Image (tube, helix red, strand yellow):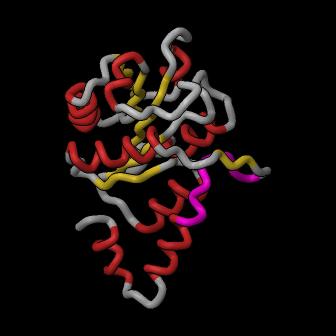
C-alpha cells in the first residue's frame, strides 16, 4: 500500500491489484478494464488461499471482490481488514455484485469493511469513478472491537434516509437500474 493516496490512476502501473471472483468471465472483464486504465500487476484470485501467494515485493494497492457469487466474500474482506491475509488491512476494497440488494450493500459497507460498491454490469466510467474515490480520497480507517474498515457512516446514514418510507422495489433506482 502506498504511503500517500494515489492522485493519478496511472500510478496503478507499479502497484498490484487483486480481483477475487470465482466467475472467470467477470474476472476477465474487470481485469481488462483495469489493464485499459494502466494496471499491469493484476492478480486474478479464485480462492482465499491464493491471496497468501501474492509476492511480498508487490504491494497490493486495491482489491475488488465479487460479493454476490461467493459465499466467502464477506469473510475474505474481514480477514484482510483483520490482517489475517498477506494484504495490508488498509488496502482499499471495492465490492461488486451481479444481483445487488440493499442487504448486500449494507453488509458490504457496514459489516465487511468494503470502501465502495459497484453493481454489474460495470462500465469503465463507473469503475474509474470508484477508483478515484477509494484511491484518491480514501476514508479514514476505523478500528473497533466489532469493525475494521473505512468510515462508511455517512454513506450508511444516506442510504437509510433514502430508504425511509420507500417501497422495497425502490432500491432498484439506488443501485443504478
Extreme residue toward the right, this view: 145
Residue 99 percent coordinates (x, y): 31, 58
Q: Position of residue 3 (x, y in %)?
A: 58, 26
In screen coordinates, is 149 left or right of 68? right
Nearer to the camera, 79 or 69: 79
In the image, residue 28 above or below residue 125: above
Look at 46% across and 60% down and name the residue there: 104
Identity of the residue drawn at 30% across and 36% down: 23
Front residue of 84 and 63: 63
Q: How many marks?
A: 0
151 is within the stretch colored magenta = yes
Query: Looking at this view, is 112 or 174 the one in front?
Result: 174
Instruction: Report the residue at 23% width, 67% height from top.
Output: 177
- The quadrant in which the N terminus is found is top right
- Rendered location of residue 93, percent (x, y): 48, 40
Q: Is residue 25 above or below residue 60?
A: below
Residue 66 included in the magenta stretch of the image:
no
Q: Quadrant of residue 17?
A: top left
Q: Which residues are magenta?
A: 146-154
Q: Position of residue 115 (x, y in %)?
A: 50, 48
* Residue 137 vertical placement versus 30 (above, below): below
Q: Residue at x 25, y 38 (%)?
A: 26
Give the left or right position of residue 21, taking residue 164 as reference: left
Residue with the most extreme front position: 7
Amino acid at each position: 500500500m502506498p504511503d500517500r493516496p494515489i492522485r493519478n490512476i496511472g500510478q496503478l502501473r507499479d502497484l498490484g491489484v487483486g480481483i477475487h471472483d470465482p466467475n472467470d468471465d467477470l474476472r476477465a472483464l474487470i481485469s481488462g478494464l483495469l489493464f485499459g486504465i494502466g494496471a499491469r500487476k493484476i492478480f486474478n484470485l479464485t480462492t482465499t488461499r491464493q491471496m497468501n501467494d501474492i509476492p511480498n515485493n508487490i504491494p497490493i494497492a486495491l482489491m475488488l471482490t465479487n460479493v454476490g457469487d461467493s459465499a466467502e466474500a464477506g469473510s475474505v474482506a474481514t480477514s484482510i481488514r483483520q490482517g489475517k491475509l498477506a494484504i495490508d488491512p488498509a488496502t482499499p476494497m471495492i465490492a461488486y455484485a451481479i444481483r445487488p440488494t440493499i442487504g448486500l450493500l449494507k453488509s458490504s459497507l457496514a459489516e465487511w469493511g468494503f470502501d465502495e460498491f459497484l453493481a454489474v454490469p460495470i462500465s469503465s466510467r463507473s469503475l474509474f469513478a470508484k477508483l478515484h474515490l477509494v484511491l484518491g480520497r480514501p476514508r479514514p480507517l476505523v478500528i473497533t472491537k466489532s469493525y475494521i474498515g473505512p468510515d462508511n457512516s455517512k454513506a450508511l446514514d444516506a442510504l437509510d434516509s433514502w430508504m425511509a418510507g420507500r417501497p422495497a422495489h425502490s432500491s432498484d433506482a439506488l443501485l443504478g437500474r
